[in-house]
Structures are given as C-alpha cells and as structure tokens.
Image (cartoon, helix red, strand yellow):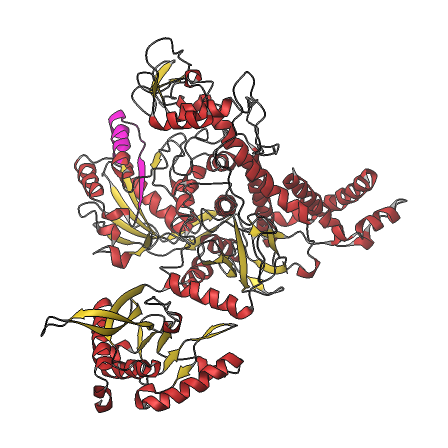
C-alpha cells in the first residue's frame, strides 16, 4: 500500500508538474491564493526522485554495510557506473547504477552499518533536473515495502506446511504393530506424545519424522490456517513462545532445549572499532578473500634464537632467491630489486608492520637496533608513512606468546608472510649412538600468494631459509 | 483540497489543450520515411548479401523504439526486483541485446515459430507476451504467462517454445519444429537461437547435418555476446567465425546492435528459407551489459570500461534514437513521452507482479499431461499420488 501511495503521489506530481512551469500565465481565479499556497508547499516543488534501494548482492544477504560512496551529491551518473561499495555478508561488492542521472542525495552515509534490504540509501534525479530540489520521501514509506515482503515470506512458508496436512488422507491405524522410524520415535518420546495419534504416511504404515513433527505442531498449538493465501496484507509472524496447555489430558511438557539467546542485552559490552582496526579488518578480509593463499611449514633446529637472526636469514634467503621477492601488480608479478622486510609489531591500536629497509645488506646488530627503534615508534604511534608502506616480505613472530605455530594473512600487494612460532624442546634419536638427546625446534609457516609463489618455490625458499638459520655462519659469507 | 486539485487540473487542461494544438501542427513536419545505409554483412557460401540501403518509416521507427525501450526497462526492473529478493532463482537479463529480438521479429510474422535458450524475456515480449504476464511469471504469481509455475527460464506463448534451460538443447528442437512446418507444407519457418557458448555443442552440429540434408526451413541464429558465462570467445572457440561453423550451410555475420541490420539480414534469411533452399545460419554480434545471470557481477572477466564503451558507442536504443532524430523522423519530446509511458507501464506491471497472489497448491499437478482429467500424477516417490484436474492445453 505504501508503494501505491508513493506512486500515486508521483502520478499526481507528474500531472501537475506541467503547470509549474509558468505560474504567471494562469487565468485569475478566486481560489488562486489557495492554489498558490498549495503549490508552494515543499512537496509540490520537489523533483520526483529515482530511488536507490539497498540491494541483495548475494542470495543470502539480508543486510549490508555501506563502505564507501564512489560518487558525490550532484555528480552525474551513467548507467553502469559504480555508485558505492557495499559490504555484504561475504565480501565487499560494488553497486552499479542502472539509470543515467544525477546523484541527488545520499541518505545512508559511509560507514552505515546493518542497512536492511530495501531501505532507501540514495536518491537520483534524471539529467537536466535540479537535483537540489529532490523531494526526500518520508522514511517510513520505504521500510514497509521491505516489511511486508519478509512477513509474506514468513507467512507463506508457515502456510505451506499447514496446507499439505489436510490433503494427504489420514489412514487410521487399526491393527498391527506400530511402526516408527527412529527419528520419529525420538521426537515423540521427548515430547511425551502418544504415537498412536500420529497419521502414518510412510510405506507400509510407517510413522515418519515428518508425521511426528506434524503431530507435534498440531497438538500444542492448533493453528487456524486460513485457506486464502493473500500476500498483500502483512500478517504478523507466529510468535514462538510457551505453548498453551493442549486440550485433553496430555501432559504439557515443554520442549527440552530452549534456544539460547546469545547477545541478549546486558550480557556483553560493545567496544566500537577504531578506524585503524576497521581498516585492518577491511584489509585483512580483502587479502584473505582475494589472494589465493598457499601454506608451507618447516621445523628447524635452533642454534641461536633471536628474532633479528630470523629477519637476517629471511633477507639473505630472499637475496639468494629473488623470485620470491615480488609483489602483485594487478596483472602479474613485479620483481623488486631491493629487500625490505616488514616486521609485525603489536600495539594497542592494532597490528602494524614497520619496514626494515635493505635488510640483506645490514648486519644482525644493525637490524636489531633498527627493529627496536621502529617498534618503539610504532607503539607511540609516530611512524612515518614511508616507514610502514612498501616492503616486500613480512615476518610475524608470536613466539613470545608461546604459540607453537600459526599461519598469517598476507599484506597485499606483498607475496609472502612468514609466521614464526616459539622455540620448543623436543627429544630426538641420535643416529650415531642410539641415544635420545634434546633439540630446540621452532616452527615457521610461510603464507604465500599462490599466483606469485607456488608451492614448489615456497618449499625451496623454506629449505634455504632453514639452511641459513641452522648454520648462521653461511649468512656471514653470503 | 479536492477543489484545489480540480481547479488546478482545469487550468492544466486548458493549457494542455492549447499545447496539443501546437504540437499537432509540428507532427506533420516529420519525414514519414527515410533511407539508411547499413553495414555490409560478411557472407559465407552465399552469392548475394542482404541489402545495404534500407528504408524505415516513422511508424516503424517509433514502434521499434517503444518495444526496445520496454524491453530495456523491463530487464532493469527485473534486476531491481531481484535485488530486493522479490524475484528469486535464475534470472538472465537481456539488456544490450534488444536490437536482436526486435529486429528478428520485424522480419517474421507471428505465424512463424521461434525457440531460444534461457535469456528469453525479450523474445517472450516480442512473440506476444505482455509485460504484466512476464513480470508476474518472474515473481512466480498466478497471472504469470506460465501460471507462475515456470519462472524466468520457462516462458511460453503461441509459436514461442521458450525458454530452455539446457545449453544447446533447443537447437535440435527448433529443427524439429521446422520439420513440422515442412511436413505440414505451410509457408512457416522456425527461428532457432543459441549463444556463443552453446555454439560448440555437438548436438548443434548434428542438427546442422539433418537440417541441411532435409532442407528444413530453419534459420539458425547465434547470438554472439562475446562471453559464454565468463569465458570470452577467444578462450572458448578454435574458430570465432560462428557464421562459418555450418560448413555446408550458408552463413551471414550481422551487426547485432543495429536493428536495421538485423531486420534486413533476417528478411534475407527468411526469403532464403521460404524459397526452399534449406537452412541458413546467422551470427549476430551483440553485447550484454549485465553479467551472465544475477549471481554474476559481470566485471570479473571484463572491465567496466569495456561495458561503458559499448554503452556509449553502440547502444541499440541510442543508435535508433540518433537515426530518428537526425533524419527528423521524431522529436526529442515525443521520444521522451514514449520513455515516460514505458516507465509507467513497467512500474504498474512491477506493482502488479509484486501484489498478485501465488498459485494455489491445487494447481500443482495441472497442465502436466494432456489426458482428460482427472489425472494421477506421481509425487516424490512411487507411492505418492497427486491429483491433476486440468489437462495441458494442446497447442495446434
């Protein structure tokens, strides 16, 4: 009804728009004053808009977040142009416009969260019309359009299970043993319902799970299912609650499991995400969903266990294998000539990766000093853009938290990230004297972009890396 | 309030009356027909080609414009409704390819037959379906053209055999329809459409063989929109000259974005068939703006720039509009008026399609068999029997 109301208004608007052009040419009439005031009301002067509603960009989407508007108010839009980016339940998808026109008003700003399907998010006008004069429809005109459709879907689905129950002819169970399927038996036992009351529809008189469920539905709350299915009138969805006592002497046993209410008010506190976290979240999602990650792990014996040695070892290995020192440039690998390693630092604001430039040519002590300085700057929030943008390879070390091994998410457009675990002691059988001896092991996992560094390349990289770490003297010679 | 409106409308009417007189004078200033130069079609195994100088009258032009605009807005409305989850399931949109449907229909009659694949909304419209019926079918309501039981891919009307979901399967069926025409010795032919992806199907080559052997009156039309789902033609076909694939069947390559090209080529092909020379193959080079279906965003295998380029340079409705305006066959206001009327028609149809009730459960088994009712129809397992009370409509 709301839809027809707004259409009707648009119809009247269109008819009367013709008379707006030249008010002075009207014949003088006694009611001219009334008419003039009628015409000067805001909703008559407005331009009827083309509505942009929140679309379902994936079949399971019910609501979305508006990430970014790609057009500004007043900017002209052609059919096929991207209007805004919408974050669905699965990914960030671009919304395209189907019409030519001018974007007149953005109703849901960037960062609007949980915008329901069908809500008005923007208004457009046709080209040549004054976009500033666009009339903004009342907010409740749009939402009932979504509400009836969802309650209709609910009503239609609740009616269809009710409808088949009158149609299959109930065969009375006269004699013979009662035949129950195991699922039906369980359901009827749990709810304490007499199986003789069920109408068997299975082969040879079997009471199936559906029959048990139907019986369950019929006995606690008898539904008066109307025969006519009218989708026009919104019907309130059946409220799940405590069933009333059934007629007869059947015991009113409530269902055994009550659906939990996660997120009920008072049971949690919401911490709004800072911008950094939001960006990190968005970038991580983008990385994990768009880059084909490939993983490879290796254990190596620790002779010296310092993070800076790891950085040095990674840099040296990259120098030996320049095919791994690449970034993704949109269509293919982009070989880099220098080796800059990003090191992950945890701050209260989030994880940030300052870069150690030209790590292969620096000594271990120099790397150590640089890493300390950068980590302190990161914690203070004083990193300059060139200190955290760029980089060809990332290293993330969670060893101090006792993590044995983990796999990290790649920072696009880099190709790899090395996840370093903690050092652990393990027993090893010594081949020469058949005695058990201790060894220090550490697990590193390399996440690589499958488009640039495939499994074979990753394995060779890890092999060289292990060789470099287990015999650090090799690095001095390189 | 009502008196205000009535006074305003009276004032409007007076003004509009004057306006009508003014515009009636200018209508006679329009050229009633003009000759246009169109692109020459590449031919294969043919001595002649379709004409390059064609005549179009003002009425024809306006009718093509209206039909193409209706098709375009209907598809865009279907896109909108799908995104509001009012249409579910499959939905393959035809916008960008309107010139093909309207051009073909312009050269055949409603007595001829047509069969196509799943991108069929446009053809349902040109073959006699109304926008209301088509949209109600998309939303699955009882006033749909297939009683709400078919959906997007199963729309039918007289001499239009759908609406076929299996890729390429409609081509042998089309040859069968042509065989019926030849057998009954009517002057009818069958237009059988398929896409660039289906063109590599084996059953199509089998059909070519039988059609050529028995000289069936069938026009095979390959709608080449450059992408079979997400695969471009260069990556899919060893030979992208789809009009030559018939080998022993003569072929034509036509610019599918120019309605006059399509109309002229179809006229040529229809004459070829009706004169008893057997089948002929036509490749229409066209483009679709949307993705393959509603679950395909359409930009992962092609760039937005490519779509925008085709939209700006070869949009079929814009091409026709430019032709009409530059030859003084219509005015901008007239075309705008047609746009507004079309928009209103589509809005009404969408409104109707959203509020119409769904088909009742009793209709489930109707129109399945052609036997006299009541008919027993098998349910989901051999022991489940459902009753069908209405037979299928036998189409003669």
Q: Quadrant of residue B169?
A: top left
- One can see residue A338 in this view: yes
Residue at coordinates 55% horizontally, 59% vertically from top-left? A66
Is A22 drawn above or below residue B368 in the view shown? below
Q: Where is residue A27 in the image (x, y as percent from the top left)?
A: 85, 48
**Which residue of the protein is positioned furthest toward the left in this rendering?**
A432
Q: Is residue B188 left or right of residue A74?
A: left
Please tell me which residue lies in front, A339 or A172.
A172
Q: Name the outermost residue toward the top.
A: A174
Q: Quadrant of the N terminus of chain A?
A: top right
State yes or no: residue B187 in magenta: yes
Return the residue nearer the eye: A352 or A135: A352
Residue visible at 45% across and 84% down in the picture: A374
- State whether residue B288 is above or below residue A432: above
Task: Please tell me which residue lies in front, A56 or B51.
Answer: A56
Residue A458 visible at all: no
**In this rendering, position of residue A313 left or right of residue A225:** left
Q: Is residue A186 above or below residue A167?
A: below
Q: Does the magenta stretch include residue A278?
A: no
For the C terminus of chain A, the quadrant is bottom left
Q: Position of residue B223 (x, y in %)?
A: 33, 48
In x, y percent, where is residue A111?
A: 57, 62
User: On the picture, is A433 further left or further right than B120?
Assistant: left
x and y percent of residue A93 in the render?
Answer: 46, 58
Report the label total: 0
Question: Which corner quadrant of the image does residue A172 belong to?
Answer: top left
Residue range highlighted in magenta: B175-195
């Amino acid at each position: 009804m709301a839809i027809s109301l707004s259409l009707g208004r648009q119809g009247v608007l269109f008819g009367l728009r013709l008379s707006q052009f030249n008010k002075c040419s009207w014949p003088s009439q006694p009611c001219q004053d009334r008419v003039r005031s009628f015409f000067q009301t805001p909703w008559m002067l407005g331009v009827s808009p083309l509505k942009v509603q929140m679309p379902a960009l994936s079949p399971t989407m019910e609501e979305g977040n508006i990430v970014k508007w790609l057009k500004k108010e007043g900017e002209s839009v052609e059919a096929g142009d991207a209007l805004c980016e919408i974050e669905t339940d699965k990914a960030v998808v671009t919304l395209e416009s189907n019409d030519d026109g001018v974007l007149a008003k953005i109703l849901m700003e960037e960062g609007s969260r949980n915008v329901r399907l069908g809500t008005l998010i923007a208004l457009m006008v046709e080209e040549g019309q004054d976009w500033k004069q666009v009339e903004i429809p009342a907010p409740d005109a749009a939402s009932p359009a979504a509400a009836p459709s969802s309650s209709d879907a609910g009503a239609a689905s609740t009616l269809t299970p009710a409808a088949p129950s009158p149609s299959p002819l109930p065969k009375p169970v006269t004699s013979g043993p009662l035949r129950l399927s195991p699922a039906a038996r369980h359901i009827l036992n749990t709810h304490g319902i007499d199986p003789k009351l069920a109408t068997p529809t299975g082969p040879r008189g079997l009471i199936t799970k559906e029959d048990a469920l139907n019986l369950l539905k019929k006995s606690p709350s008898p539904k008066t299912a109307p025969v006519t299915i009218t989708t026009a009138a919104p019907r309130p969805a059946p409220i799940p609650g405590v069933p009333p006592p059934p007629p007869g002497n059947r015991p009113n046993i409530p269902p055994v499991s009550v659906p939990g209410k996660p997120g009920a008010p008072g049971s949690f506190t919401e911490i709004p995400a800072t911008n950094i976290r939001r960006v990190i979240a968005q970038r991580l999602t983008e990385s994990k969903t768009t880059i084909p990650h490939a993983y490879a792990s290796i254990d190596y014996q620790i002779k010296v266990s310092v993070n800076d040695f790891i950085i040095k070892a990674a840099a040296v290995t990259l120098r030996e294998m320049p095919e791994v020192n690449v970034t993704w440039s949109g269509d293919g690998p982009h070989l880099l000539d220098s080796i800059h390693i990003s090191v992950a630092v945890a701050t209260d604001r989030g994880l940030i990766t300052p870069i150690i430039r030209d790590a292969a040519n620096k000594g271990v002590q120099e790397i150590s000093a640089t890493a300390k300085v950068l980590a302190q700057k990161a914690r203070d929030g004083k990193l300059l853009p060139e200190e955290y943008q760029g980089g060809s390879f990332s290293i993330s070390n969670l060893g101090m938290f006792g993590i044995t091994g983990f796999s990290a998410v790649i920072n696009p457009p880099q190709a790899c990230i090395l996840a370093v675990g903690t050092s652990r002691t393990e027993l090893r059988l010594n081949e020469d004297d058949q005695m058990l001896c201790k060894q220090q092991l550490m697990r590193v996992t390399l996440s690589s972009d499958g488009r640039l560094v495939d499994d074979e390349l990753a394995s060779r990289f890890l092999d060289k890396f292990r060789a470099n770490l287990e015999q650090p003297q090799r690095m001095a010679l390189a | 309030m009502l008196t205000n409106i009535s006074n305003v409308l009276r004032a409007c009417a007076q003004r509009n009356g004057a306006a009508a007189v003014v515009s009636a004078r200018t209508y006679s200033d329009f050229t009633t027909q003009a000759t246009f130069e169109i692109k020459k079609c590449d031919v294969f195994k043919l001595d002649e080609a379709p004409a390059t100088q064609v005549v179009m009258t003002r009425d024809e032009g306006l009718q093509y414009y209206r039909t193409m605009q209706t098709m375009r807005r209907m598809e865009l409305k279907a896109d909108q409704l799908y995104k509001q989850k009012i249409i579910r399931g499959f939905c393959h949109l035809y916008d960008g390819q309107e010139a093909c449907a309207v051009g073909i229909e312009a050269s055949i009659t409603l007595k001829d037959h047509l069969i196509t694949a799943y991108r069929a909304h446009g053809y349902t419209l040109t073959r006699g379906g109304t926008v209301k019926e088509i949209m109600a079918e998309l939303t699955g309501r009882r006033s749909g053209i297939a009683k709400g039981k078919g959906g997007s891919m199963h729309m039918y009307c007289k001499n239009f055999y759908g609406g076929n979901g299996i890729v390429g399967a409609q081509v042998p069926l089309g040859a069968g329809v042509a065989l019926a025409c030849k057998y009954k010795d009517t002057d009818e032919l069958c237009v059988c459409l398929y896409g660039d992806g289906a063109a590599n199907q084996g059953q199509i080559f089998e059909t070519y063989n039988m059609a050529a052997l028995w000289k069936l009156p069938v026009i095979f039309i390959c709608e080449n929109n450059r992408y079979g789902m997400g695969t471009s033609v260069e990556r899919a076909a060893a030979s992208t000259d789809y009009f030559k694939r018939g080998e022993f069947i003569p072929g034509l390559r036509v610019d599918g974005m120019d309605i006059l090209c399509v109309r002229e080529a179809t006229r040529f092909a229809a004459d070829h068939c009706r004169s008893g020379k057997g089948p002929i193959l036509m490749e229409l080079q066209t483009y679709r703006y949307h993705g393959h279906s509603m679950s395909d965003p359409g930009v992962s295998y092609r760039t937005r720039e490519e779509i925008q380029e085709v939209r700006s340079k070869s949009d079929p409705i814009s091409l026709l509009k430019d032709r009409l305006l530059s030859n003084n066959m219509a005015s901008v206001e007239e075309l705008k008026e047609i746009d507004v009327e079309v928009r209103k028609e589509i809005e009404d149809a969408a409104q109707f399609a959203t509020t119409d009730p769904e088909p009742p459960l009793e209709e489930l088994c109707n129109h399945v068999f052609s036997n006299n009712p009541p008919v027993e129809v098998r349910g989901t397992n051999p022991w489940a029997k459902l009753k069908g009370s209405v037979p299928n409509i036998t189409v003669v």
